Image (cartoon, helix red, strand yellow):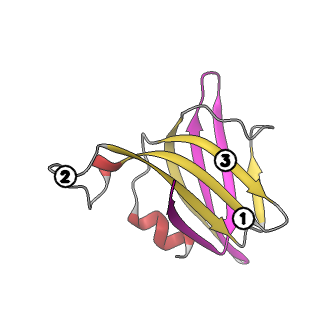
């Protein structure tokens, strides 16, 4: 799915980033998220767990910028997710909370999808 459609269909607020991995040679970036399933429109209180571990897989990544110099994350809360229109692709910006600062991750990619962790 394209990035804009993804952003419009999921609520990541208060979910946490557990792991980020980027393979520059294959242009694939993966973000493992402890997702607040209860915040999603498809959540069924009777049958679904409140949180689930899922991985976002970005393909065709042409840009990845992090305000942090490392890919080490430790249950960083997702404060906000923003779509950033660009003339040469679609970008998404994740704003995360950490113990001592705010982290931003900006990803320009052709495609994003959920994969089960």
Residue drawn at (58%, 44%) of the image: 95
Q: In this view, does 13 lie to the left or right of 32?
A: left
Drawn side of residue 18 relative to residue 15, left or right: right
* Chief secondary structure of the magenta portion: strand
**Furthest-front residue in view?**
117
Residue identifier under label 1: 28
- Could you tell me residue 54's position as x and y percent? 48, 53
Q: Which residue is drawn at 69% across and 75% down?
A: 89
Secondary structure under tag 2 reads: loop
Q: 24 or 83: nearer the eye? A: 24
Name the residue rendered at 79%, 68% in the picture: 26
Percent x, y for residue 76?
Answer: 56, 34
Which residue is at the far top?
100
Q: Residues within 10 Å of mark 2 (few under 14, many from 20)?
A: few
- Residue range corresponding to the magenta coloring: 88-117
Instruction: Relative to 37, say whether 110 is above or below.
Output: below
Q: What kind of element bears circle 3?
A: strand
The mark nearer the N terminus, 1 or 3, is 3
The residue labelled by disc 3 is 20
Q: In which quarter of the image is residue 50?
A: top left
**Residue at label 2?**
47
Residue pictured at 63% horizontal, 43% vertical: 19
SS type, badge 1: strand
Q: Mark 2 or mark 3, which is nearer to you? A: 2
């Amino acid at each position: 799915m394209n990035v804009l459609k993804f952003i419009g269909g999921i609520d990541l607020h208060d979910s946490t980033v557990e792991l980020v991995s980027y393979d520059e040679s294959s242009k694939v970036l993966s973000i493992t998220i402890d997702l607040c399933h209860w915040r999603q429109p498809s959540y069924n209180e009777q049958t679904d767990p409140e949180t689930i571990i899922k991985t976002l897989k970005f393909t065709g990544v042409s840009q990845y910028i992090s305000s942090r110099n490392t890919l080490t994350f430790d249950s960083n809360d997702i404060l906000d997710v923003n779509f950033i229109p660009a003339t040469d692709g679609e970008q998404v910006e994740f704003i995360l909370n950490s113990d001592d600062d705010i982290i931003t991750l900006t990803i320009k990619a052709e495609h994003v999808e959920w994969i089960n962790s």
